[in-house]
């Protein structure tokens, strides 16, 4: 018997041999099929009994598809030698059986050109290349076996590069439609919101939805939509508070803070003077028996800067059943007439048409205040009456620190009506800022009228001269708005988000004050006051109502935006009254003075506000 191993002989499967072989070996065996059949005819019949014994040791397994050289498929059982043709016998020598049944040879060697050689990485690579070539040749044919379509076998390299979504489809073919539906925006949002997180190896948490997001660029964090949204949010937030401009503004805010002891001393002095003036008016002036105090102005709005040196106190007389007529087309000035009544303390100031003579009433009020402060234990000086000014101004010198405090006592009428005048219909836009409910509550409050007029005092309108006109005032509502300035109820409260609305107003007031001092000689800025700054802020808050748009960390950006609004009002010479849009607060300022102020502000903006240093 020939002891040399024939090239076409096959090794039967031993019990120690692994069940699964590589696809490359299976295809190599199929290519040698014809050689094996010829060699089997030349073998001896002595080993037929050994073949039967080996067949019993073969592991059980399902059938699989194998392609012939023409691309057709046939059913072959794993680890089983193809059946020889009729008349042929499969024989192998005793030495071949011993070598085949050895565990080392069965696991570490394979047959190549009729000889056993160690299995190396290069051999494995060659096998993969041969299998790829045979696969490419099989694609040229379109044969089918057992009525089933030809299947394409993928290599391991293809499986490694396949995306996660594709591998999931192979694992669960029933979810193919579900995975494909992730391409739509609606399904992406649904998966993102309903996916449950799962932890992998104690590292970052991922979900099946996140796998789908990795496979779909539209859901990726680096997609154009997400980048655009991030850019918009960054643009809205603006520069951080720790940048150069932010540091300058923050330092200025700290400089504008009022010391607690100065605030306490000033407020106690003003309260004492006010109490004694009110008591004197009630005792000695008949029409002031029901007079009330209304604290208004920047100090009570917590937007006073530098020093507590200015206080505004409105002393009001309540009136009911009044007839209000517009004195001008803007809707800010009115003539007031008392309607049907028996007797009223203000009867002494009525004209024949029942309208109240505001000028005469203000004159008596001024004299009464003078008498009230004559005997007070303070160094008080009453300022000369300013034209068209409804206030009686007291200059009080403090003994503790020598600071001078200005106190304005303003005469006013408190009007109770079911609604505000019609000119306020298109103003007071705080719905998207403070809410509709808050707006309704404020509009149920009374409004006030102060004896102030514009133009010449002897100008008549429907029989009423200008000096007897009254200007409408919502200073009490302005104080409530600034105290409840946040979109959320906890804005600037302990535990809530801090905003920079009031700080922006303080900076604008300080900028306006400094520019007016620098231009005191030319007097080009005499038409501007702090009320223009406050009105600009109210419009800005109504336009940008959310607290995120006024985050304290974005102080520099918010102040720049507020200045842009103010400069735009100056360029257009149009700043509408926040409550009465038809009333332009800049109508008395000339275009040249507005442009002068606008240019000065722009110059400060470009140079990071050197005036603050």
Image (cartoon, grey):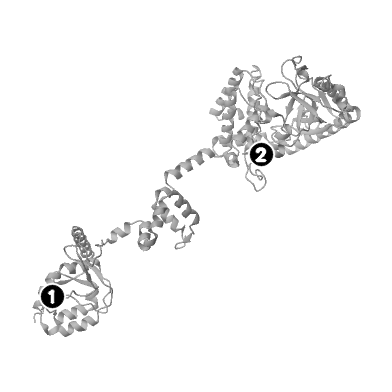
Measured as percent of width and height from the top left, residue 402 is found at: 78, 29
Measured as percent of width and height from the top left, residue 144 is found at: 22, 63
* Placement of the C terminus among the 4 image quadrants: top right
Give the residue at mark 1.
Answer: 85
Measured as percent of width and height from the top left, residue 193 is found at: 50, 54
Return the residue nearer the eye: 409 or 545: 545
Q: In this view, does 127 lie to the left or right of 255?
A: left
* Placement of the N terminus among the 4 image quadrants: bottom left
Q: Residue 106 carries which label?
A: none
Q: In this view, does 265 lie to the left or right of 39?
A: right
Give the residue at mark 2.
Answer: 485
Q: In this view, does 371 lie to the left or right of 583?
A: right
Local SS, label 1 = loop
Query: Of callouts 1 and 2, which one flags the residue occurring earlier in the amino acid sequence?
Result: 1
Instruction: Kindly indicate the quadrant of the structure image that contains residue 114.
Output: bottom left
Q: Nearer the viewer, mark 1 or mark 2?
A: 1
Position of 44 relative to 371 (above/below): below
The residue at 33%/57% (across/down) is 162
Return the residue nearer the eye: 61 or 159: 61
Local SS, label 2 = loop
Instruction: Kindly indicate the quadrant of the structure image that contains residue 355.
Output: top right
Instruction: Kindly indicate the quadrant of the structure image that contains residue 498.
Output: top right
Q: Distance between the residues labelled 1 and 2?
A: 97 Å
Q: Is residue 197 left or right of residue 81?
A: right
The residue at 61%/30% (across/down) is 612
Measured as percent of width and height from the top left, residue 469 is found at: 76, 21
């Amino acid at each position: 018997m020939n002891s040399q191993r024939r090239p076409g002989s096959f090794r039967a499967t031993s019990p120690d041999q692994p069940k699964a072989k590589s696809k490359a070996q299976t295809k190599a065996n199929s290519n040698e099929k014809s050689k094996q059949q010829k060699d089997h005819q030349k073998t001896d019949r002595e080993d037929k009994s050994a073949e039967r014994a080996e067949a019993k040791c073969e592991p059980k397994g399902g059938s699989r598809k194998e392609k012939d050289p023409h691309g057709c498929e046939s059913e072959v059982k794993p680890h089983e030698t193809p059946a020889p043709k009729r008349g042929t016998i499969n024989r192998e020598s005793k030495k071949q059986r011993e070598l085949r049944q050895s565990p080392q040879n069965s696991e570490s060697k394979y047959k190549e050109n009729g000889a056993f050689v160690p299995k190396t990485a290069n051999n494995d690579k060659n096998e993969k290349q041969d299998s790829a070539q045979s696969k490419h040749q099989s694609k040229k044919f379109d044969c089918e076996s057992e009525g089933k379509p030809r299947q394409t076998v993928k290599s391991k390299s293809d499986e490694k590069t396949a995306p996660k979504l594709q591998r999931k489809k192979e694992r669960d073919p029933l979810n193919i439609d579900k995975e494909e539906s992730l391409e739509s925006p609606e399904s992406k949002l649904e998966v993102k919101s309903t996916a449950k997180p799962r932890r992998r190896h104690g590292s970052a948490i991922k979900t099946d939805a996140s796998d789908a997001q990795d496979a779909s660029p539209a859901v990726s964090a680096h997609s154009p939509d997400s980048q655009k949204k991030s850019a918009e949010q960054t643009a809205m937030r603006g520069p951080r508070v720790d940048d150069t401009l932010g540091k300058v503004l923050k330092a200025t805010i700290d400089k504008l803070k009022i010391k607690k002891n100065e605030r306490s001393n000033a407020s106690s002095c003003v309260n004492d003077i006010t109490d004694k003036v009110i008591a004197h008016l009630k005792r000695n002036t008949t029409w002031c028996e029901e007079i009330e105090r209304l604290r208004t102005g920047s100090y009570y709005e917590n937007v006073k800067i530098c020093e507590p040196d200015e206080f505004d106190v409105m002393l009001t007389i309540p009136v009911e059943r009044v007839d209000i007529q517009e004195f001008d087309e803007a809707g800010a000035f009115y003539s007031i007439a008392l309607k049907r009544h028996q007797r009223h303390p203000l009867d002494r100031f009525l004209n024949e048409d029942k309208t109240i003579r505001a000028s005469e009433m203000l004159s008596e009020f001024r004299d009464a205040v003078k008498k009230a402060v004559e005997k007070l234990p303070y160094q008080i000086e009453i300022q000369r009456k300013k034209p068209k000014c409804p206030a009686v101004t007291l200059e009080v010198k403090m003994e503790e620190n020598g600071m001078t405090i200005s106190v304005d006592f303003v005469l006013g009428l408190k009007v109770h009506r079911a609604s505000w005048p019609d000119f306020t219909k298109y103003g007071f836009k705080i719905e998207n800022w403070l809410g509709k409910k808050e707006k309704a509550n404020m509009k149920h409050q009374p409004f006030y009228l102060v004896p102030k007029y514009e133009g010449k005092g002897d100008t008549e309108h429907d029989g009423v001269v200008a000096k007897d006109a009254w200007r409408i005032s919502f200073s009490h509502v302005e104080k409530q708005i600034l105290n409840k300035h946040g979109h959320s109820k906890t804005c600037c409260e302990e535990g809530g988000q801090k905003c920079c609305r009031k700080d922006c107003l303080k900076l604008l007031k300080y900028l306006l004050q400094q520019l007016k001092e620098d231009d005191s000689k030319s007097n080009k800025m005499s038409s501007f006051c702090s009320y223009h700054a406050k009105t600009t802020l109210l419009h800005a808050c109504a336009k940008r109502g959310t607290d995120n748009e006024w985050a304290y960390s974005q102080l520099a950006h918010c102040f720049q935006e507020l200045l842009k609004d103010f400069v735009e009002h100056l360029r257009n010479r149009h700043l509408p009254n926040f409550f009465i849009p038809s009333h332009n607060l800049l109508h008395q300022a000339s275009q040249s003075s507005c442009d002068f102020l606008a240019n000065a502000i722009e110059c400060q903006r470009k140079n990071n506000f050197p005036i603050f240093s």
